[in-house]
Image (cartoon, rainbow, N blue to C red):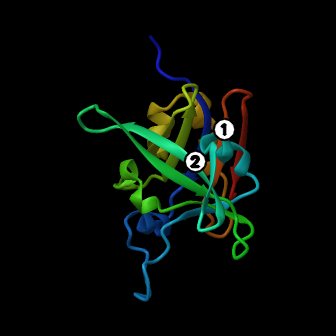
Amino acid sequence: MAGPKPLAIFWQELLPGDIRKIEAQSNDAQTGGGARDLRFPDAPFRPVLERMFPEEGQVRGRPVRHGTLVWEDAKGTSQHQEIEYWPPTSARPGEGRLARIHEIEPLQQPPEAGGDTVLLVLVLDDLKQLRAYYTTSGELRDKWHDDVAQPILECLGKESKGGVARRGWLDLIDGTSYCHGS
């Protein structure tokens, strides 16, 4: 029997500052905890992220979307964790964010880049399960299906605009994709 079929993918290149957020080491000034959210332009990503984070709620009076991340631990036991996507606030009207990235258990240890680009990939499948992965540009070329790897590698092949992380989404139902940051 075949496994779940991916329907939608959100991916983001992880820059050194993003890695420090994930490792909870982003407090450069030592005056606070440092940012712990993975931020991105909201408008082009909201439609795919609303599919991944289907539950609407409120946190401290602000709208928040929730999704349940699933994964298998080292023993093969199914695990899950609720994670949050925060739409823009009045302070940051164009930015959405994946909240408290450093607390997302299966993302605790990002891989070493080893000369490749490190990526965070969220995958929504036909069982309505949301999964998170780290991969590298080299692994994309060697281990991922071409329908997923090619659009991402194409986007990564474009020059980044002023140190902006490249990111995008893929809709594997209708074959559309979006590349941002290049």
Residue 154 point in image, percent of width and height: 65, 43
Q: In the rendered view, would you say 33 is above or below 29?
A: above
* Residue at image location 70% in from the left, 69% down from the top: 89
* Front position in the image: 114 or 108: 108
* Front position in the image: 150 or 178: 178
Quarter where residue 138 is shown: top left
Are there few (<14), some (14-19), or many (20+) residues within 10 Å of tag 1? many
Are there few (<14), some (14-19), or many (20+) residues within 10 Å of tag 2? many
The residue that mark 1 highlights is: 170
Q: Amino acid at mark 1?
A: Leu
Q: CA distance from mark 2 to mark 1?
A: 9 Å
Residue 178 point in image, percent of width and height: 72, 45
The residue that mark 2 highlights is: 11
* Front position in the image: 133 or 91: 91
Q: Is 181 on the left or on the right of 74, as rendered?
A: right
Q: Residue 84 got which mark?
A: none
Residue that protrudes farthest toward the left in the picture: 75
The answer to the question of whether label 2 and label 1 lie on touching residues, with beta carbons closer than 8 A, is yes
> Of helix, strand and loop, which one carries label 1?
strand
Q: Amino acid at mark 2?
A: Trp
| Residue 72 appears in the rendering | yes
Q: Is 58 on the left or on the right of 178, as rendered?
A: left
Residue 14 point in image, percent of width and height: 50, 58
Q: In the rendered view, would you say 19 is above or below 33?
A: above
The N terminus appears in which quarter of the rendering?
A: top left
* Residue at image location 44% in from the left, 32% down from the top: 143
Residue 176 point in image, percent of width and height: 74, 35
2 or 1: tag closer to the N-terminus: 2
* Residue at image location 57% in from the left, 49% down from the top: 66
